[in-house]
Image (cartoon, rainbow, N blue to C red):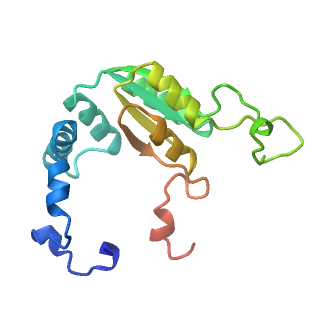
Amino acid sequence: MNCAECEAKECYRGKDCTPYITEIEEKITGTDLETMKAASHIESCYYKKKTRMEETMLYAHKMGYRKLGLIFCIGLSGEARKIHEILKKEFEVVSVCCKVCGIDKEEYGLEKIESERFEASCNPIGQATIMNKENTDFNIVVGLCVGHDILFYKHSAAPVTTLAVKDRILAHNPLGYIYSAYY
């Protein structure tokens, strides 16, 4: 498969280019089917009408989620505070920043940005553990580092979506790299 290089995109009109259709269709059941229904409903009703934030909230309501986890990078604390304020109007919200537990990077032999001072490690496994203990229904990630996000997704018991990704150079808009002829 190499869909990125396909010019025709005939799948958009119903063509199956894979030998896996039966295996894939057998997996679309239960909560996975409910997730697909909720996502399709939001897409069909709000296409080009709602922001990612609004769609995330609509999805949470459609799925019946009441307790949301907000998992964020400490560098996006201001943004997380605003997101928390918006979410708490309609949901119970638990939030955990990346430096939770204050674990020294030296404890695990991790590289530091500045070697002369204490530096707390990002702790995505800790963030996931706390969300699991809090029994969140749905987790929302804001700006975790590449790799740290992977560990959070791996260890989260609840479904996860990403509201914003971190890109320190491009104002958290990694597609700016693709759109810019100057970078």
Q: Measuring 73% from the left and 34% from the top, which residue is drawn there?
A: 120
133 vs 25: above or below: above
Q: Nearer the viewer, residue 102 or 52?
A: 102
**In this picture, residue 149 sits left or right of residue 120:** left
**In this picture, residue 171 sits left or right of residue 19:** right
Q: Nearer the viewer, residue 144 or 130?
A: 130
The answer, for residue 143, to whether it is visible in the render is: no
**In this picture, residue 155 sits left or right of residue 118:** left
Q: Position of residue 138 (x, y in %)?
A: 35, 30
In the picture, residue 163 is in which quadrant? top left
Q: Position of residue 28 (x, y in %)?
A: 17, 47
The answer, for residue 177, to whether it is visible in the render is: yes
Q: Measuring 31% from the left and 74% from the top, which residue is drawn there?
A: 1
33 vs 102: above or below: below
Q: Measuring 45% from the left and 45% from the top, which residue is drawn there?
A: 164
The residue at the far right in this view is: 116
Q: Position of residue 144 (x, y in %)?
A: 54, 43
82 vs 91: above or below: below
Q: Measuring 27% from the left and 31% from the top, which residue is drawn there?
A: 60
